[in-house]
């Protein structure tokens, strides 16, 4: 229905991702001593919600999940398979998959092509997104230099510096604190008031927004820490203001979808597969422990790890890797739940370029270091995700409210259903989606 939508006959859509929000924090607020009045009002008392949560994708890691959320496809398909780029010798200096995929159509692009104002604020994997107003997530060093970079890759160029005159520093991806989220909230409100509101009489809007601090507080202090619940309560207050502003702008012609990308759980151990690969002669390191050459390398994604061979035709290295994995699987208390071949991982929707994928037991987080002990009790992060997508702790949240949305509960929701569901409500085709529309 190209260019046929207008604000008189089609509701606008606000998509908000709250990183790592577990369904229990929504539905068991009294038990967990958390108060979320806006989520309760808009989604439990009035809207549609999933008490059993939503199945995430493989791996249950932030960047693959967000691109799945905005495309309706699995990581195997959109090719964003991890947070950071596979880079054993650090040629890319810690680069992440900041960019919107080029394999399949995103909801930003589909909305824009079909008569919507398409906008985004701080959403992971949005650099280069084909929308009207895109304030992406990106970072370099956490300084004011980040604003210059983000301003250059934003759409249109100049929008970040224009925004910063009113709200202060736009939050780069390195500031995941409560204060960083406060700036994300201000940026989303600024986008609504200054870019979307002046055009709302001509077109409805699709806006994606993102809050990161609950996930970060859990990483630092633990899933059920008071710091994490306080971060979530602050997000709820910002969410309420965002919804109220969007409702005012649209005169209640609005659909709001609040989701998370995955769940989270507390850790007990860090495990280091590259230590075993180095011991088998498959990795060489310098005296400081940096990888200088490799024949096989394990790249972490929280509770999963992708292993690639540098040369799949190197039969000697392939055989040595098989021996390492066989011993690891037989090793008692290795923390390994399963070892998948690359084909098996792709069948689950993840890791398109992997030769093998390690899946850890609950509480064992993978790390990439190639020196030291294989298993350590000293944790890098107290809570983590990336674990098996079938673990109940990894289930994400799904909630909707607004025009045409029934009141009640829904089950059997998948992360890849989010984009096609919103596309259907907007009457926008999303031809590449592997999920399905939930409210036909």
Image: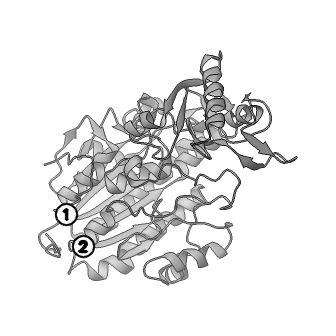
The residue drawn where x is 22% and y is 58% is 431
Mark 1 secondary-structure assignment? loop
Q: Are marks 2 and 1 in contact (CB under 8 Å)?
A: yes
Compared across the picture, whether 252 is left or right of 326 comes to left
User: For mark 1, what is the residue?
Assistant: 428
Mark closest to the chain's N terminus, 2 or 1:
2
Q: Residue at x 20, y 39 (%)?
A: 408
Q: Is residue 210 left or right of residue 321?
A: left
**In this view, 330 is above or below 56:** above
Q: How crowded is the residue under tag 1: few (<14 C-alpha within 10 Å), some, or many (20+)?
A: many
Tell me if 19 is positioned left or right of 253 in this view. Answer: right
Label 2 sits on a secondary structure element that is helix
Q: Nearer the viewer, residue 414 or 301?
A: 301
Pick the residue in front: 337 or 131. Answer: 337
Percent coordinates x, y for residue 94 in the rendering: 66, 58
Where residue 364 sits, quadrant-wise, is top right
Q: Which residue is mark 2?
A: 113
């Amino acid at each position: 229905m190209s260019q046929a939508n207008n604000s008189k006959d089609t509701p606008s859509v606000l998509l908000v991702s709250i990183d790592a929000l577990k369904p229990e924090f929504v539905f068991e607020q009294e038990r967990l001593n958390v108060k979320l009045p806006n989520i309760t009002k808009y989604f439990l008392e009035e809207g549609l919600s999933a008490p059993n949560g939503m199945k995430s994708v493989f791996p249950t890691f932030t960047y693959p999940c967000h691109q799945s959320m905005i495309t309706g496809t699995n990581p195997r398909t959109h090719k964003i398979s991890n947070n950071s780029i596979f880079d054993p010798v650090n040629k890319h200096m810690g680069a992440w998959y900041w960019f919107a995929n080029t394999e399949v159509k995103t909801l930003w692009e589909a909305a824009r092509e079909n008569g919507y104002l398409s906008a985004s604020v701080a959403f992971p994997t949005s650099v280069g997104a084909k929308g009207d107003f895109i304030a992406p997530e990106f970072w370099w060093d956490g300084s004011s230099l980040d604003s210059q970079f983000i301003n250059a890759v934003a759409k249109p160029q100049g929008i970040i510096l224009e925004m910063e005159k009113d709200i202060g520093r736009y939050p780069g991806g390195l500031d995941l604190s409560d204060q960083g989220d406060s700036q994300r909230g201000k940026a989303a409100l600024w986008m609504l008031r200054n870019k979307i509101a002046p055009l709302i009489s001509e077109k409805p809007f699709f806006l994606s927004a993102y809050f990161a601090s609950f996930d970060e507080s859990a990483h630092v202090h633990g899933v059920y820490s008071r710091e994490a619940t306080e971060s979530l309560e602050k997000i709820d207050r910002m969410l309420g203001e965002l919804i109220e502003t969007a409702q005012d702008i649209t005169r209640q012609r609005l659909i709001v979808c609040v989701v998370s990308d995955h769940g989270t759980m507390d850790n007990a151990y860090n495990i280091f597969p590259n230590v075993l690969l180095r011991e088998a002669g498959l990795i060489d390191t310098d005296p400081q422990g940096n990888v200088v050459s490799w024949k096989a390398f394990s790249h972490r994604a929280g509770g999963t790890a992708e292993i690639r061979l540098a040369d799949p035709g190197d039969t000697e290295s392939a055989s040595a890797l098989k021996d390492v994995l066989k011993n690891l699987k037989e090793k008692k208390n290795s923390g390994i739940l399963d070892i998948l071949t690359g084909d098996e991982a792709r069948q689950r929707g993840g890791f398109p370029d992997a030769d093998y994928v390690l899946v850890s037991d609950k509480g064992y987080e993978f790390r990439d270091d190639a020196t030291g002990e294989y298993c350590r009790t000293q944790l890098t992060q107290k809570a983590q995700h990336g674990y098996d997508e079938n673990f109940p702790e990894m289930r994400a949240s799904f909630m909707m409210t607004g025009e045409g949305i029934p009141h009640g509960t829904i089950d059997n929701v998948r992360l890849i259903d989010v984009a096609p569901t919103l596309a259907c409500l907007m009457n926008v085709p999303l031809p590449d989606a592997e999920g399905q529309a939930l409210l036909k």
